[in-house]
């Protein structure tokens, strides 16, 4: 059972600890600094924090198990773009948007997804990083474009627990991509997704899809969920095909999705009004949950603000613990909520945190 959690915000990293069944804020790190991502590594107990320091660039820090000290480590870095390159993208690290651990058989291996759409791999706990050139050099990358940002961004990294060489990633707006050989080669993996923001003849193009977040159920790893710009999709065959979930309550738009660690038919979403008004539907915060693979949903509101609520939950702002029951959620306007019963009821942890970028258990 997870007894620690973290909330990465625009003004610091906040650590929560569960004691005697109650969650309390226990520590703060990088106070006043934007923390874009946090990753606990269950293989060795380390925790990683990515910072975005504007003029000073993106930074990465690690705290080892048993230590209270954070150590700055190497951040990913793009190679120098050749002067004759036709690529319009600036090969400069904007920020680290996702972090993931390699498999249990790969101690020290880390993955990082970044803006502008790069995937990096470290073999040594972040001491060094290499751009995964096979994906960066893919001809199809010329089709990628920015969604919420003005450049593509790689936000989801799903390592198959059965095979560490099998990794699926999600890109806004570049679709889903999969490797079966540790990153030596890649192929599109967004068949079935649909982009209504494109001309009709290109709506099914795998290379320009905008998955907002993709997650894998590690206990049933063939099952993946995607909260897409244009709806919710599910794959039951390891991303080979995606099926749209059509009967979705409130709204099929949102950013976050969390999947039960052992039951790939159970997933949670946070619906919002699309595009021009990115707020909860009717200004009342709700979480939707399916336990049957998307055939039906429950709308969960108990304990969440139901009037004058304008909180948006970002892509990494919703997480489920390894017990499959404990959920943590934090918003753009400083709200943080926790549920210990799968979302049936929620308790408010804080109403005045800085805007939250990511939450996780560890």
Image: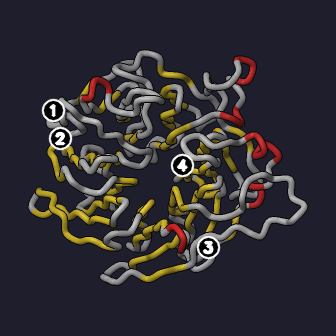
The N terminus: image quadrant = bottom left
Q: Indicate which disc residue 123 carries.
A: 3
Looking at the image, can residue 133 be seen? yes
Locate residue 279, reporting x and y percent.
35, 33
Mark sitting earlier along the chain (2/1): 1
Instruction: Give the x, y percent position of residue 319.
Output: 35, 48
Residue 209 falls in which quadrant of the image?
top right
Disc 2 versus disc 3: nearer the observer = 2
Residue most extreme to the front: 55
Residue at screen point 55% across, 61% down: 95
Dot 1 lies on which element?
loop
Task: Kindly identify the residue that appears in the image at 35 percent across and 19 percent down.
Answer: 249
Q: CA distance from mark 3 to mark 1?
A: 44 Å
Characterize the local packing of mark 2: few (<14), some (14-19) or many (20 or more) Cα atoms within 10 angstroms: many
Which residue corresponds to mark 1? 302
Q: Earlier in the sequence, mark 4 or mark 2?
A: 4
Spatial CA distance of label 2 from label 1 is 6 Å
- Do residues under tags 2 and 1 come within 8 Å of each other at their CB atoms? yes
Percent position of residue 123, x then y: 61, 73
Q: Is residue 359 left or right of residue 89?
A: left
- Residue placed under numbered mark 2 in the picture: 346
């Amino acid at each position: 059972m997870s007894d620690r959690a973290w909330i990465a915000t625009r003004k610091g990293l906040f650590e929560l600890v569960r004691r005697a069944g109650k969650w309390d804020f226990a520590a703060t790190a990088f106070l006043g600094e934007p923390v874009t991502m946090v990753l606990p590594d269950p293989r060795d107990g380390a925790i990683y924090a990515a910072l975005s320091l504007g003029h000073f660039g993106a930074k990465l820090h690690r705290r080892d198990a048993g230590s209270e000290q954070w150590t700055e480590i190497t951040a990913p870095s793009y190679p120098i773009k050749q002067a004759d390159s036709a690529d319009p993208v600036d090969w400069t690290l904007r920020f680290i948007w996702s972090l993931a651990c390699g498999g249990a058989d790969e101690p020290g291996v880390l993955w990082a997804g970044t803006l502008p759409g790069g995937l990096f791999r470290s073999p040594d706990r972040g001491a060094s990083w290499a751009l995964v050139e096979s994906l960066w050099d893919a001809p199809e990358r010329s089709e990628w474009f920015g969604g919420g940002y003005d450049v593509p961004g790689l936000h989801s990294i799903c390592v198959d627990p059965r095979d560490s060489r099998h990794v699926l990633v999600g890109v806004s707006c570049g679709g889903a991509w999969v490797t079966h050989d540790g990153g030596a080669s890649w192929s599109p993996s967004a068949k079935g997704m649909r982009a209504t923001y494109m001309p009709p003849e290109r709506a099914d193009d795998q290379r320009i899809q905008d998955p907002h977040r993709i997650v894998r159920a590690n206990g049933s790893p063939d099952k993946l969920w995607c909260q897409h710009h244009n709806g919710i999709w599910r794959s039951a065959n390891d991303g080979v095909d995606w099926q749209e979930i059509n009967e979705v309550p409130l709204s099929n738009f949102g950013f976050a999705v969390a999947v039960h660690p052992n039951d790939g038919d159970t997933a949670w979403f946070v619906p919002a009004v699309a595009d021009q008004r990115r707020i909860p539907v009717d200004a009342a915060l709700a979480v939707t949950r399916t336990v049957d693979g998307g055939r039906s949903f429950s709308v969960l509101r108990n304990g969440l603000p139901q009037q004058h609520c304008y909180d948006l939950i970002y892509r990494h702002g919703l997480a489920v613990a390894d017990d499959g029951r404990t959920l943590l959620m934090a918003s753009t306007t400083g709200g943080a909520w926790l549920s210990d019963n799968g979302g049936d009821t929620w308790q408010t942890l804080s109403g005045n945190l800085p805007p939250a970028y990511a939450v996780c258990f560890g």
